[in-house]
Image (cartoon, rainbow, N blue to C red):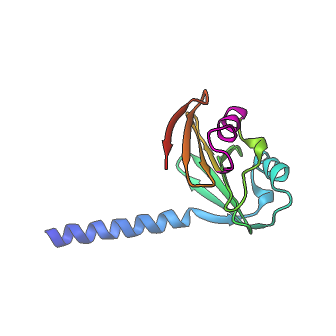
Amino acid sequence: MKKTFLTLFLMTTMFGAAYADSREKPTSVDKLPQAAQEFLSAHFKDLTVAYAVEEQKYTGKEYEVVYTDRTEVEFRSDGQWESVGRKYSPVPASIVPQPIQTFVSGSNYPGQFIRQIDRNAYTWEVELSNGLEIKFDNQFNVIDIDD
């Protein structure tokens, strides 16, 4: 009985993983939603796209664009950006809300820059060049700092 259950569990896990992989497919920037295309051309027009991926989720499609300098941008199904990460450079200041910029660039973290920014319906999270992660609520109050 245990062997049958274990075999069934392993087969289910393998088929689930195979199904998850098949929901991700390559795409091109010109097939992204209009809002995503405009965001990329406004903030990353000088970079070279390495690849773009469309992933089918239960709630719709999500998109990821990766550049040759290892910049990664993730979009929701409506084309609004969800995450921007850069390996060696700061994210564009124009996408960082002013209260977050002020908090980071003030006397709190001199010499550090934001290399990752994530947002969702409830929070904003930034990662600084020294690896420190700071989470803000929607009113830009600090709710967590994780080193």
**How far across and how far down the image is residue 105, in percent?**
69, 41
Q: Image height check: is 86 above or below 142?
A: below
Q: Give the image quarter of residue 141.
A: top right
- Please tell me whether residue 109 belongs to the stretch shown in magenta: yes
The residue at 56%/62% (across/down) is 23
Residue farthest along the top direction in this orientation: 139
Residue farthest along the left direction in this orientation: 1
**How far across and how far down the image is residue 120, in percent?**
58, 39
Q: Image height check: is 102 above or below 61?
A: above
The residue at 81%/55% (across/down) is 44
- Seen from the viewer's position, the closer of residues 101 and 6 is 101
The residue at 68%/32% (across/down) is 99
- Seen from the viewer's position, the closer of residues 79 and 146 is 146
**How far across and how far down the image is residue 53, in percent?**
66, 62
Q: Please provide the residue range marked out in magenta.
A: 98-115
The residue at 69%/50% (across/down) is 111
Residue 127 lies left or right of residue 39; in this view the side is left
Rendered-image quadrant of the N terminus: bottom left
